[in-house]
Image: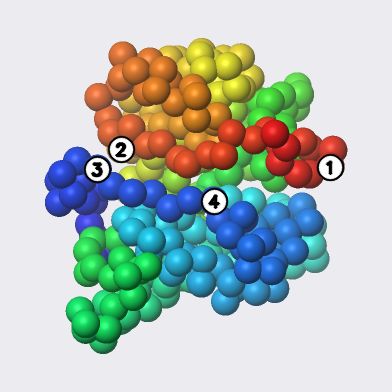
Amino acid sequence: MASLKLSELLTNSDGIAIVDGGLATELERHGADLNDPLWSAKCLLTSPHLVRQVHLDYLEAGADIIISASYQATIQGFRAKGLSQEESEALLRKSVDIACEARDLYYEECSRTSVEDRDDNKILKYRPILVAASVGSYGAYLADGSEYSGNYGNTANLDYLKDFHRRRVQVLAESGADLIAFETIPNKLEAQAYAELLDEENINVPAWFTFNSKDGENVVSGDSLLECASIAEASKKVVAVGINCTPPRFIQGLILSMKKVTTKPIIIYPNSGETYDPIIKEWVL
């Protein structure tokens, strides 16, 4: 199953595949305290069983693609917590291992549960399932809300961003994930950094890029969405492009805009329509 490609999954599912939903929201529903610079990645240290359960919940709800708990998991962030380089890299691999374990548990559940004994509230169907390794933006590491503004200051130039993400991407590419999901990309600069990094490191695991928008036309930094999506379209390493962390009212228009510049599959994440307040570190209406 690990060699399954996104294109094959879409072919097998009539052109539509279901991505899972918010990880942090569900972790909190299960009792996790995420008030930490590591956010959901904190659970890789404190409660990996909750991460596994949330992955399993989404599979039982019908997800075809589950995304690892590595969005805010960076080597730099773990090192700031006192972990070694080796321990930090191990946690990145662990995020993918947990998702793969949830997939295995789901398949076991499908195999041992007869049709008569199945819960109507669970979708227990043996089907192709992909695990995507999440890569959050530089702003997610900063934990100051800048992934929702794209304002990184003057220090974070192209080379700086590539070097920041380089080892993390290398580790996740070797983790056994089926995809690498570059999520909540707030500006054109970081999209370019990712595209160049994929080429420089000869990453062979297919990737997708998803951007966020607050006006329905541009990414949150004000950069043109069409220019950002064109970077993804030009990269042979990128197999899909889309939108996440964006109010639902903008989604249809953004899809139509992206389709002007890309022929690749479009990825859309679910969203409640709330806005993140970096001061109180909460989502507000």
Camera-nearest residue between 274 and 208: 274
The residue lying furthest to the right in this view is 279
Q: Which residue is mark 2?
A: 239
**Secondary element at image label 2:** strand
Q: Earlier in the sequence, mark 2 or mark 4?
A: 4
* Residue 280, numbered circle: 1
Report the amino acid beneath label 1. Answer: Ile
- The Cα–Cα distance between marks 1 and 2, rounded to whole angstroms, is 36 Å
Disc 2 to disc 4, C-alpha distance: 22 Å
Q: Amino acid at mark 4?
A: Gly
Residue 102 at what x, y percent from top left? 42, 72
Kind of residue indicated by mark 3: Ile
Toward the viewer: 84 or 211?
A: 211
Colouring scheme, one of rainbow, by chain, secondary structure, one colour: rainbow
Assess whether mark 2 and mark 1 are in contact (beta carbons under 8 angstroms): no
Q: How many marks?
A: 4
